[in-house]
Image (cartoon, rainbow, N blue to C red):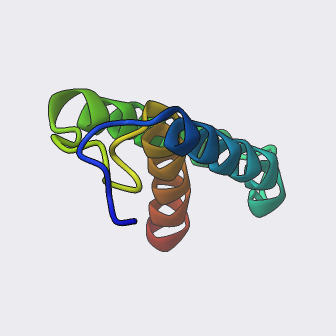
Amino acid sequence: SGWAPYRTPEAEAIALAGGAQIADALPRVVDRPGDPVARADMLAGAVLGFAYHRLVGCQTGTCPITANPYISTLYGALMGYVVSGALG
């Protein structure tokens, strides 16, 4: 009951399963697969997402996005793509 102040194997498995679902869905989100600018923006977002996980992270391990490097990287890639579409 409630959030644990540390990572548990169950929480890690759930986070990895969620990350796998996002990774599987991400190519379907990209409606411009041949656009190198969109891909570069996604890569930049992924790098920033991973950097945020490493530099800021989550002290308690209960943060849904930043506690897991896979989730934060995929979320960063998705945000990079969204920003690419908004600015491009």
- Please name the residue shown 55% across and 55% down the image: 78
In this rendering, would 38 be left or right of 83?
right
Q: For this rendering, which residue is in front, 67 or 26?
A: 67
Q: Is residue 40 visible?
A: no
Please give the count of numbered marks on the rendered protein.
0
Q: For this rendering, which residue is in front, 42 or 76?
A: 76
In this rendering, would 55 be left or right of 6?
left
In this rendering, would 46 be left or right of 62?
right
> Quadrant of the rendered structure where residue 37 is?
top right
Is 16 placed above or below 21 here? above
- Please name the residue shown 57% across and 41% down the image: 10
Residue 77: percent from left, percent from top:
52, 46
- Please name the residue shown 47% across and 38% down the image: 73
Q: Is residue 65 visible?
A: yes
Residue 55: percent from left, percent from top:
17, 30
> Quadrant of the rendered structure where residue 58 is?
top left
Q: For this rendering, which residue is in front, 69 or 27?
A: 69
- Please name the residue shown 40% across and 56% down the image: 64
Residue 28: percent from left, percent from top:
84, 58
Tell me the quadrant of the picture where the N terminus can be found: bottom left
Is 9 placed above or below 62 here? above
Residue 36: percent from left, percent from top:
66, 39
Name the residue furthest front: 1
In this rendering, would 40 be left or right of 20?
left
Name the residue furthest bottom: 86
